Image (spheres, rainbow, N blue to C red):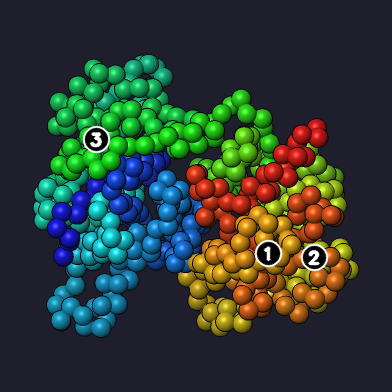
Amino acid sequence: MAKEGHKYIFVLGGVMSGVGKGVVTSSIGLLLQQKGYKMNLVKVDPYLNVDAGTMNPTEHGEVFVLRSGLETDQDMGNYERFLGRDLTAEDYMTSGMVYQSVIARERGLGYGGKCVEAIPHVRDEILHRIESASEYNGSQISVIEIGGTIGDFQNALFIEAARVLKMKYPEDVLFVMVSYLPTPGTLGEMKTKPTQMAVRDLNSYGVQPDFIIARSKELVDEKRKEKLAIWCNVRKDRIISAPDISSIYEAPLNFEKDNLGDAILDALKLPEKKKTSLVAWKKFARAVANTKAREVTIAIVGKYFDTGDFVLSDAYLSVIEAIKFSAAKLGHRAKIVWVNSKDIEKGGREAAAVLGKYDGILVPGGFGETGIEGKIKAIQFARENKIPYFGICYGMQLMVIEYARNVLGLKDANTTEIKKSAEHPVVDVMLEQKKHLAANKYGGTMRLGVYTAYLKKGTIARAAYKKELVEERHRHRYEINSSYVKSLEEVGLVFSGTSPDGVLMEIAELPRSVHPFMLSTQFHPEFQARPLDPHPLFTEFLRAAIVKNKRK
Ligand code: GLN
């Protein structure tokens, strides 16, 4: 089945979650790509959801949409940003997806009347997906991140699949364990025992790690590396110290200093095809982390801010990164301020006025009713006070609603997502979407993935992209209602981007003569912003914010 000589690197987490398996996977991808190998990076998500589209953003973070339209985990966003290229639907799987295929085959008598079991059938489906991802992408090396921690029930079948792959191709499979070495405050000493236990746990699956990436607060010293080497059966030069860093983009640079790329090639008995060049990456990483650069402050007005152990910013991860890339390109450092739209809703105009101190206001994508009136107030404030505004998806729909209400004078303008009986449904559900909703078919049924947009001449959008046709990724059910387009345009709103047939509105903007930057998109530009290739619309937004900042 597998191409002869294709290599697989599995990245597993020991001790605890959240210590950076995704960054390790992305970094290995970048390093080996820089050494001349064609890479594909796979995320295995043990959730039973069939895709990430139905996962809760406050618990699971951002839903990252691939070019193909598959809704995936935010790690896929990091993979694409580090590799600087698109990944495919084959590069992502959840337990739900795997089981769904097995069950569908069983219902179709695809197993020839046999009893269907986790082993071998589910395991083999996992193997089939891992192998076809590498074939589909024509890659030479796959790096596969297994979500969760060693010892979880949920990911055991995936580890078992990895073990079997190693058995099939002993020379072609590597295991990298990302572990954590705590330094308890009372002792003041870094401890290796949890890592030893995690390796023992992994051994009980029949898997031996080849590398240990030892995450910790500070550098792991030689003594501890020796201890780990002896107790974990891992060569000392394959224990890589990975202390905390201020930006994830430093990680590949640190790994390269420790020769991780060479060590992996050595372990896989592969030659270095070309000398690693991280010059451009290093320049970018330095620019992003440059604390001396002038700060430009962007307020993100959103609602996904209030759950227990979830990291506040995760729900908007790609938006934040896109802002950082463009700010760095313009020689600035982005400071992001979170503004809860519910607070603006409660506090009214006064609360919105607080936004006046920021250099730019951004309303990102979202769903449902919560905090909507607060977002609309924020947009009105940005428009009336000429503060650079960038709206994404819901942020465009609400910008159009605000304009319809306060400029066109349609007081009851709304989206039917919130008010079905709105007198003026300026934003309405698309026809084919009505069928999905009537049948309660929510998962994977939105307008998803890449669509082409045509950009009108003489607009901010066209000047930013310097192109007539662009492809951008979508994730929405509602659209600007075309019956209001003409009257909105008559009072000054410009729809600078549309579907090529002119039916769907893709970008709305105000001319520069009335506002320094007031632009929003129905699509999600953040998914295609890359470290070495920032997104033109984010760059234009930041440029306008910097102008405002300089006036202070
Ligand atoms: N809720 C809106 C819709 O479904 C916007 C979606 C979004 O912002 N991603 O159309």
Secondary structure beneath label 3: helix
Tell me which numbered mark, 1 or 2, is placed earlier along the sequence: 2
Residue 318 seen by the camera:
no
- Residue 205 picture location, percent across and down: 17, 47
In the drawing, what numbered circle is on residue 190? none
Q: Which residue is mark 1?
A: 507
* Quadrant of res 40: bottom left
**Discs 3, 1 touching: Cβ within 8 Å:** no
* Quadrant of res 222: top left
Secondary structure beneath label 1: strand
Tell me which numbered mark, 3 or 1, is placed earlier along the sequence: 3
User: Which sits in the foreground, 37 or 67?
Assistant: 37
Q: Which residue is mark 3?
A: 262
> Cα distance, mark 3 to mark 1?
46 Å
**In the picture provided, is 168 more to the left or to the right than 143?**
left
- Residue 428 picture location, percent across and down: 69, 75
Vertical placement of 394 versus 228: above or below?
below
- Residue 500 picture location, percent across and down: 61, 75
Amino acid at dot 2: Leu
Q: Which residue is mark 2?
A: 493
**In the picture provided, is 12 more to the left or to the right than 430?**
left
> Cα distance, mark 3 to mark 2?
55 Å
Secondary structure beneath label 2: loop
> Cα distance, mark 1 to mark 2?
10 Å
User: Which sits in the foreground, 464 or 243?
Assistant: 464
